Amino acid sequence: MKRLVTLLRIACMAVLFALVVTVLWGWITRELGDQARWSEELARLLLVWLSLLGAALAYAERAHLGIDLLTARFDPATARLTALVGHAATAVFALVVLILGGGELTWDRWHSGQLLAALQIPKAWMYAAVPLSGVAFLALALAFTRDTWRSPVAVAEGRP
């Protein structure tokens, strides 16, 4: 799991860097009189990738939005069960919606021949972030489930 988290961090940093450079280039060219046509579309594509990969990274680092006001008061056994149910729900969502649904969407866009207008690349590249992030979410959810099962009190209380 550490390798996956490291890979997600590197990918998010690279995509964020590319996004900043792209937006900066678009702003510079707009100020010079004629904005680069591709900059806005590439920025949109990079933002989609950053959002989905960043969400997986936030889940990996337990930095995602969560309200533990109620679960913090649970006894360890109930907190463990709650954590297991949460990770199972995440795994099911990742498999059904992100991997299967996102994979089908990506596949359909790839075979439709649709192109991003300014970049002239397949529109499937925009959607490919969905199943990829789904694979990361599924792997993380399974790892968290395993860790919760093995060490219920520490993991249920949010300690690594």
Image (cartoon, grey):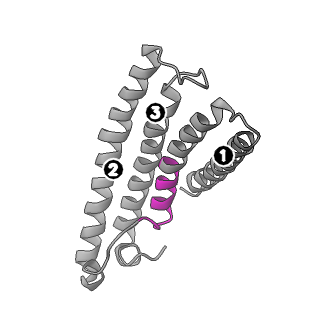
Q: Check disc 2 and report its element: helix, strand or loop.
A: helix
Q: Name the residue tied to disc 2.
A: 91
Q: Nearer the viewer, residue 155 or 110?
A: 110
Q: Name the residue tied to disc 3.
A: 127
Please tell me which residue is depicted at 68% across the width and 41% down the height of the picture: 26
Q: Is residue 97 magenta?
A: no
Q: Nearer the viewer, residue 95 or 22?
A: 22
Res 155 → quadrant = bottom left
Please tell me which residue is depicted at 29% across the width and 55% down the height of the picture: 88
Please tell me which residue is depicted at 60% across the width and 51% down the height of the picture: 12
Q: Amino acid at mark 3?
A: Tyr
Task: Sort mark 3 into few (<14), some (14-19) or many (20+) by Cα contacts within 10 Å.
Answer: many
Res 101 → quadrant = top left
Magenta-tinted stretch: 52-64
Which numbered dot is residue 23? 1
Q: Check disc 1 and report its element: helix, strand or loop.
A: helix
Q: Amino acid at mark 1?
A: Val
